[in-house]
Image (tube, helix red, strand yellow):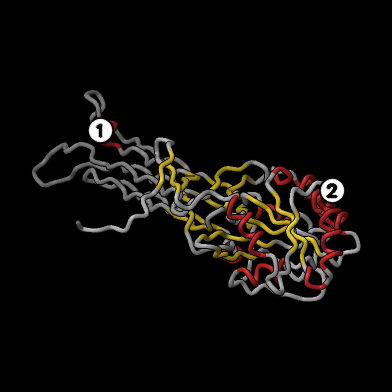
Amino acid sequence: MHFLDQAKIFIRSGAGGPGAVSFRREKYIEYGGPDGGDGGRGGDIVFEAVPGLNTLIDFRYSQHFKAPRGGHGMGKDRTGAAGKDLVIEVPVGTQVIDEDKETVLADLTEAGQRITMLTGGMGGRGNASYKTSTNRAPRQHQPGEPAQEMWVWLRLKLLADAGLVGLPNAGKSTFINRMTNTKARVGDYPFTTLRPQLGVVRHKGREFVLADIPGLIAGAAEGAGIGDRFLGHIERCRVLIHLIDIENDDPAEAMRIVERELAAYGAGLDGKPRLVALNKVDLVDAELAAEFARELEAEGAEKVFPISGATGEGLEPLLDAVIARLPAATVTERPDGEREEEDDTPWSPV
């Protein structure tokens, strides 16, 4: 399945059906009077977040979505049929943005969440509703309210608990492949990762979602390399894992480059908790790894985790630190805002 995280679509709700002009005509009934029914209301445009989707690729082949209009009113005081709402299914984490690409109209962050974006037009009145004591045979009716229409952008921001950042060839793909069932491409050249990857990490009875994005380079915020387009996919992460290649000529400068790009992007990325991991320590001796770790701590890293994504060395302490920064699995949020511990005692009929 191809990955697409932005799409522009046209949406239009249904117009209201016109009211009818009709008069009762039955045998032996003289002057039956008006009996034109009202028109039906048009269908709404509804966005719904559904699980199981992680791309907007379907919207590349279908860009126009139009809800059906309401039915015409009819004689015998029959109201026109209402137009069926058009439900557009999108992945969880999708934002609906105005055509200016700045105003966020809706943010669908939970499975099953729905938002009515455009409301269908009301049906017009039939001539039966215009009957009065002085106007016994009205011939006027309403045409029904017009449809609403607009162009919107859909932007997908993947939902993950932790995100991987770093320069190209820092070993992010190898790391996520080892920790999850993801089959990310690994190669000895820059930008082997061209689209975000998601995987589920299981560690000590806990699970969390890990996201890998293409590598950053200096000037990414201005569009260099793949640019900062995919940084939006880690905006919702609770913690960032910054991988640094120990074979880099200057690991401290590598850390500064990524830090500057996160700050330049904004959206609170520079304020998220970050765990610095010195990757590929299996390729150097322990003394050199310790020296580089001290340099990174001198540059502001709270703690440096020497790891090897290829061999698995040092991964357990890093994952422990990630788990410690995520909400406890046994704590739930009650509707009244109070927190309560779940009871793990097995159910018994006695």
Circle 2: residue type: Glu
Quadrant for the N terminus in the image:
bottom right
Q: Position of residue 163 (x, y in %)?
A: 66, 57
Q: Residue furthest front?
A: 287
Q: Residue at x 14, y 46 (%)?
A: 26
Q: Residue at x 64, y 72 (%)?
A: 178
Quadrant for the C terminus in the image:
bottom left
Left/right placement of residue 226 relative to residue 322 reads: right
Numbered circles on residues, count: 2
Q: Residue at x 19, y 42 (%)?
A: 24
Q: Position of residue 30 (x, y in %)?
A: 13, 38
Judged from the image, the secondary structure of the residue bearing numbered disc 1 is loop
Residue denoted by label 2 = 299
Tell me the number on the disc at residue 16.
none
Q: Is residue 301 visible?
A: yes
> In 3D space, how far apart are the residues under numbered discs 2 and 1 (Cα atoms)?
87 Å
| Disc 2 versus disc 1: nearer the observer | 2
Residue 79 higher or lower than 129, as above or below? below
Foreground residue among 216 and 6: 216
Judged from the image, the secondary structure of the residue bearing numbered disc 2 is loop
Circle 1: residue type: Ala
Residue 288 higher or lower than 329, as above or below? below
Q: Is residue 8 visible?
A: no
Residue denoted by label 1 = 137
Q: Residue furthest top?
A: 134
Q: Position of residue 121 (x, y in %)?
A: 43, 42
Q: Crowdedness of circle 2 by 10 Å Cα count: few (<14), some, many (20+)? A: few
Earlier sequence position, callout 2 versus callout 1: 1
Q: Crowdedness of circle 1 by 10 Å Cα count: few (<14), some, many (20+)? A: some
- Is mark 2 in CB contact (under 8 Å) with mark 1? no
